Image (tube, helix red, strand yellow):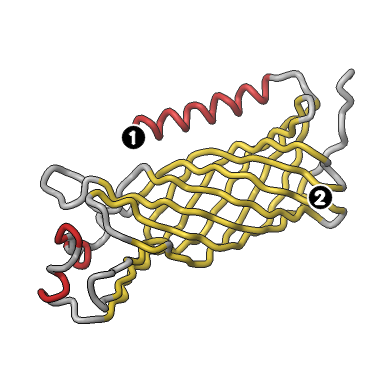
Amino acid sequence: MRKAFIIVIVTCCFLNTKAYSQIGEPRNDLAIGFNAGYTLNQVSFNPTIQQKLKGSPTFGFTARYTCEKYFKSLCSIQLEVNYANLGWEENIETSNDTYKRDISYIQIPLLARMGWGYEQKGALFYVVAGPQLGFCLSEKSHKSGLFNDSTLNLRPGLINQQYGMAVKNKFEYGITAGAGLEINTKIGHFFLEGRYYYGLSDIFGNGKKDVFGRSANGTIIIKAGYLFDMIRTKRIPTNQ
């Protein structure tokens, strides 16, 4: 998993460096703003725990630097600092017990962005991809029901150790990718985007003596946002 994460970072750095070296129309545009949306999260447990998609709001800050237009593709680097409430909600079918764990994170995605369409006025389609880092701020459990031997022993595979386990790895990392539509206007840039985050690190220990071999976040993200221009340079024709 760690090797895969390193490969992703190196690949993104290579692509960004390559974008700078291409002979296209240079850009020096910086836009900043905010984003907000909704996450649907599950934790990929091994052994498996039956879950529902756990929904929660997310919001944060976005900064985007556009460096070049190569043919019809706008090449950008995007940095975000977001707050997200992840964790999991169990689907317990063997009793009336209910359980949900809220795990709050600060997340920092660093994304390569490619866009096609109108730069100044009109619609632009884009894709984003890159590594994401996160840090656990807090966690809280919500449960109701008996949670005694009569209900715990009915759990599939007798997996119930997670209820008393605190998050071990506060730092997490993974990869994220998505696509969106941006509307460019005189007053700024409005966008709507869908994204998926695949966690490469585990929230609990994953050693031979640990209960879970894997316990990583997997998140569907739907978000909208607004960016306004801080720096917007004059366009240089391709033949110059």
**Do callouts 1 and 2 mark residues in contact (Cβ within 8 Å)?**
no
Q: Is residue 25 above or below residue 91?
A: above
Q: Residues within 10 Å of mark 2 (few under 14, many from 20)?
A: many
Label 2: which residue? 184
The image position of residue 199, as x and y in percent, is: 39, 46
Residue 58 position (above or below residue 181): below
Q: Foreground residue, 84 or 47?
A: 47
**In the image, which disc is placed on residue 2?**
1
Image quadrant holding the N terminus, namely top left
Extreme-front residue of the structure? 94
Q: How many marks?
A: 2
The crowding category of the residue bearing disc 1, from other C-alpha atoms within 10 Å (few below 14, some 14 to 19, many at least 20), is few
Say what secondary structure mark 2 lies in.
Answer: strand
Answer with left or right where residue 36 lies relative to residue 43: right
SS class of the residue under badge 1? helix
Q: Nearer the viewer, residue 44 or 102?
A: 44
Q: Position of residue 170 (x, y in %)?
A: 32, 54
Going by the numbered disc 2, the residue's amino acid type is Asn
Quarter of the figure with the C terminus: top right
Looking at this view, is 223 or 25 the one in front? 223
* Percent position of residue 200, x then y: 36, 42
Residue visible at 30% across and 75% down in the picture: 98
Residue at 40 percent of width and 35 percent of height: 5
Q: Is residue 139 left or right of residue 9?
A: left
The kind of residue tagged 1 is Arg
Mark closer to the chain start, 1 or 2:
1
Q: Residue at x 43, y 28 (%)?
A: 7
